[in-house]
Image (tube, coloured by chain):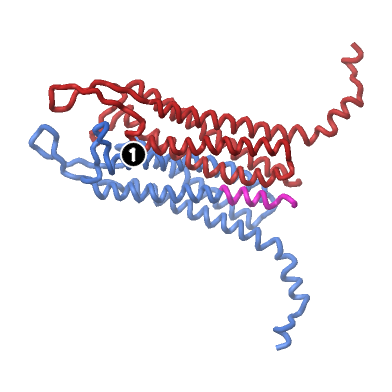
Chain colours: A red, B blue
Amino acid sequence: MASTAKPDPESIKSEEAPAAPGPRRSNYSSADVALRVLLFAASVTAVVVMVTAKQTEIVPVPGLPISVPLEAKFSDSPAFIYFISALSVAGLYAILTTLASISIISKPAHATQFLLHFALWDVLMLGIVASATGAAGGVGYIGLKGNSHVGWGKVCNVYDKFCQHVGSSIAVALFASVLLVLLTMLSVFSIYRKIPK
Amino acid sequence: MASTAKPDPESIKSEEAPAAPGPRRSNYSSADVALRVLLFAASVTAVVVMVTAKQTEIVPVPGLPISVPLEAKFSDSPAFIYFISALSVAGLYAILTTLASISIISKPAHATQFLLHFALWDVLMLGIVASATGAAGGVGYIGLKGNSHVGWGKVCNVYDKFCQHVGSSIAVALFASVLLVLLTMLSVFSIYRKIPK
């Protein structure tokens, strides 16, 4: 009982004294690594779900009394192609920066320079991923609802599974954008923390 | 001649000593203010050009032998409405942060805290503006080229002036996104510069 109520003061000291700057730095770094791994997972998921969005349906040909099988796939829309390119780049970026972030934990000597580069590149990536998500979302919304003003018919009443894939992919990409915002904020905050008050 | 070749050493000292940290800081701050003023101008331009994108054309009604005047306007597309909302928010944000940035130049005491908040909010704004630009771009591209796979006809062969407005507005919004990337990078770099080497 006595040992749990009053632990040896020296053991506390030896545990806390060198750990004081340690845990905080490794907290930031491990949050960074975790977010980057999540970003990689989200990017790959978005790309895979979008690429596998294929559905063949038998649709009537307008003006003729016949129906033909027609396949819907992501490459029908330039916005979806841009989406896949952007998310692939983000996935590649996530692998590279995860490795760089892990290298910071083991060798914290150049951590500040790394953080600066992380912040600068994360911002660029955010711009690319956010615009790709917006483009795919804008086109996907027309597919879902159509646009009666210009006579663009909806697609998702026929190609339901295709639209489910596209919608899920866009949702995951939105999550990836949020992750990139958080990553940039984390890098900025880590740099800010190094300024002596 | 002697006075220009060998100027009074005291006058140099009094000029350079307090100016050493001054010009560099004011360089960053004035670049920040200039970029924010540009961001405001770009946002307002994008919104105004998009809102004024109205064109009425006489188009034939499909299936009937009559033609009716039809107006194309930005509110026909949800993507353009999102675009205008996002760019309006960015314009408002640009005014507020320009004032804040000017206040830093006059009172540099809390500059670092301001820079941190600038960096954090700029990133969020970038996400919003980039996604809005992407969404409007994706929809605008369908209007320009159509999409034969799903039978979405092009619009810009009829509503040429409308499309010119939309295209210009998207181009200006892309410029605003680039400005936001630069602004975030500038804030991050200004914070980084304050870390003692």
> Which is more toward the observer, A171 or B64?
A171
Stretch in magenta: B184-197
Q: Main secondary structure of the magenta part?
A: helix
> Which is more toward the observer, A116 or A147?
A116
**x 36%, y 39%: residue:** B138
Amino acid type at image mark 1:
Val
Q: Quadrant of residue A70?
A: top left
**x 56%, y 44%: residue:** A121
SS at mark 1 in the image: helix
| Position of A141 relative to B137 (above/below) | above
Q: Is residue A148 visible?
A: no
User: Is the N terminus of chain B in the top left, top right, bottom left or bottom right quadrant?
Assistant: bottom right
Coordinates of residue A11 in the picture (x, y in percent): 89, 25
> Which is more toward the observer, A68 or B57?
A68
Coordinates of residue A43 in the picture (x, y in percent): 50, 32
| Position of B171 relative to B10 (above/below) | above
Coordinates of residue B62 in the picture (x, y in percent): 14, 34
Coordinates of residue A104 in the picture (x, y in percent): 69, 39
Q: Quadrant of residue B64?
A: top left
Give the chain of mark 1: B
**Mark 1, residue position:** B139
Q: State yes or no: residue B180 in magenta.
A: no
Q: State yes or no: residue B195 in magenta.
A: yes
**x 73%, y 65%: residue:** B18
Q: Quadrant of residue A59?
A: top left
Q: Is residue A70 visible?
A: yes
Q: Residue furthest left?
A: B65
| Position of A122 relative to A71 (above/below) | below
